[in-house]
Amino acid sequence: MKRGRLFRLILTAIALVIPAALIVIVAFLARYSWTAIGFNGVRFLGTISWNLGNLYMNPVVRNGYHVPLGANYGILAFIVGTLFSSFLAILFALPVSIGTAVFLAEAVPRQVRPGFAMLVELVAVVPSVVFGLWGIYVLIPLIAHVFGPAITAVLGFIPFFNMGNSSGSGYGLLAAGIVLALMITPIIATTLYDALLQVPPELRESAVALGATRFEVVTKTLLPTVRLTLIGSVVLALGRALGETMAVLMVSGGALNYLPNTIFTPITTMAAFILSQLDSALQDPSEMAVKSLAEIALVLFVITLLVNASARIIVRGAARVRGV
Amino acid sequence: MRPEAKSRRNALTRFKLLPAMAAAVVAAGLGAAHAAQQVTLVETGSSLLYPLFNIWVPVFEKTHPDIRVTTQSTGSGTGIAQAISGVVQIGASDAYMSDPQIKQNKGLLNIPLAISAQAINYNLPGLNSQHLKLSGPVLAGIYTGKITKWNDPQIAKLNPGMKLPDHKIIPVHRTDGSGDTFIFSQYLSFSTPSWENSVGYGTTVSWPATSGGLGAEGNPGMVEALKQNPYSIAYIGVSFYKQVAAAKLGVAMLRNKDGKYVLPSASTISAAASQLVSKTPPDERISLVYAPGPNSYPIINYEYAIVNDHQPNKATADAVKDLLTWASTKGNAAQYLNQVEFKALPKPVLKLSEAQIAKIH
């Protein structure tokens, strides 16, 4: 009995480490960026002009804060870049992952199934910098010379899909979206594949008995059964896409001070921007630059939290509708 | 033999080995104690200086067996920050520390190790073998989006007789913090008042929003962006000249302070350096950009070692002094510098460095 209680105590302590770490990180970010939050106010979220200011002169006093001359921190462009690229990634990844999972669970002979599944899982362990390199040397020329002109030919009448309105370099929103999609596809596909294997055989058998074709079994019986798992895996994937840094930094074209006006225009995401600016921000004698970067991290955290929370609400709502 | 028995036997033999292993450990410990005089220095920072340090270190360690040097390429800002915090002994930086930084961190020394330069490269189909003439104001116009096409009258005026294409310019800039951005934006600031008043200079600047602009990561990313995009232009450190030449990109002649157009070469870089040597202050923090003189190449800079004058102990201080003295004298031999296209420090500068290195204790 005593032993059981000790065991429980140890388990509780271990389990508390993760939420504690989370709270400590958020508390640190909030405390560290506190002066930046005070100085930036709501302009931080609502403006698109980012300027570290003159780091080689003495800081000036503005609204009671010591900041470099000309410093201005607005991150709207990075928020837009982050959300757009992640949204595109989900858009591309969703059909591919569903197709992959169904193919693995339904079409591949049982004996070779583990081999195929492992191949998909292997994509998930490729380091992001490798995806970035592949993006620069393979994907970007492809977009510049093949995908870009093709999309423009079909959808060019919509300005947002016309490559003529951009530099046509291939670096940008589309490249970031495709690289991210590749990185999150295995997350969705493998989770969904595992769930499909768990579907009770009786369900499938009764569908077949009712005269359903193979296609109908998949679309009307299997996929609706694993719907909640699908939403859950998309949320996981979205979390990965929102926070991805290196691969996006390498292919996004590093936009500054403007919003994307086409799918081919350079963007910057919040995570990539923190990494690319940190080195210069370290030279700010007033430290406002580094603190503002910490504030970006805080905003990114809040966005990820909101995405997670809303997905949870969707899942709960869906469960209630089905009366589970 | 049954598995358990076998494993027991293995355990036994291992047991017999134990004394021998213990002896080996003790011997190794003694060896370490004997070599306790050995000092390990860590260098981190500038990605431009990193290749040179990797050429230097093996040679230096051969003549100084009691000193080990670890090198890292992290970026100039990180180099300065970690030298200040004391995480590393030597921070490498393409840019000197600012006045406010020096004021906050007394005792930090900026010691030049070599002279570097920067080329303006472009990818103009059919014209890459010719040297386009460009000036600070024209480059500022391109990077602010005021000059958008290659056949703009302002570019044509500098290049009479050249058939410039009627095509959009793609200006490429660095997205990461970089000494290259620092000296490029200094060239634009010193030559173009409107740039100085709106954008200024720094290791990253707030690039004006240009519709066709592009950001690239690191010098390799700049070369790749130029290669892939006809009609683009970029600023790239001369140590990447091999990659630039292999990609058959163009090199621009730049207008210097005297109004003459010059290419980056050994003679124009030394000419510019010699103009500013006499002006270099005792703490050696000075920009070499936009030097006067008819033959001076306008974008050159000192590559710095950022060092705290107070080191944790005498052995470390002596090792740092040895390394810096060796690097700025013997290390400045052409056999090392030529590999990265750097130029040697002029003699009078060495005198200043000597005085600064002597302060390390």
Image (cartoon, coloured by chain):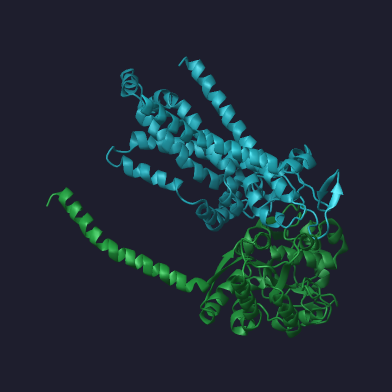
Chain colours: A cyan, B green
Counting from the top left corner in percent of width and height, residue B189 is at: 82, 64
Horizontal side of B156 relative to B227 (left or right) equals: right
Viewer-proximal residue, B58 or B66?
B66
Q: Which residue is drawn at 63% across and 49% down?
A: A272
Residue B183: which quarter of the image?
bottom right
Viewer-proximal residue, B323 or A169?
B323
Give the answer, above or below, for where A284 lies relative to B112.
above
Q: Residue at x 46, y 35 (%)?
A: A14
Give the answer, above or below, for where A67 lies relative to A94.
below
Counting from the top left corner in percent of width and height, residue B259 is at: 85, 76
In the displayed image of the protein, which residue is found farthest to the top? A323
Horizontal side of A207 relative to B253 (left or right) equals: left
Q: Is residue A155 visible?
A: no
Counting from the top left corner in percent of width and height, residue A132 is at: 54, 53
Residue A109: which quarter of the image?
top left
Counting from the top left corner in percent of width and height, residue B18 is at: 28, 61
Quarter of the figure that contains the C terminus of chain B? bottom right
Give the answer, above or below, for where A293 lies relative to B169.
above
Give the answer, above or below, for where A229 lies relative to B254.
above
Q: Which residue is drawn at 40% across and 23% down?
A: A221
Viewer-proximal residue, B202 or B189?
B202
Q: Is residue B348 visible?
A: yes
Tally the marks. 0
Horizontal side of A73 relative to B70 (left or right) equals: right
In the displayed image of the protein, which residue is found farthest to the left? B1
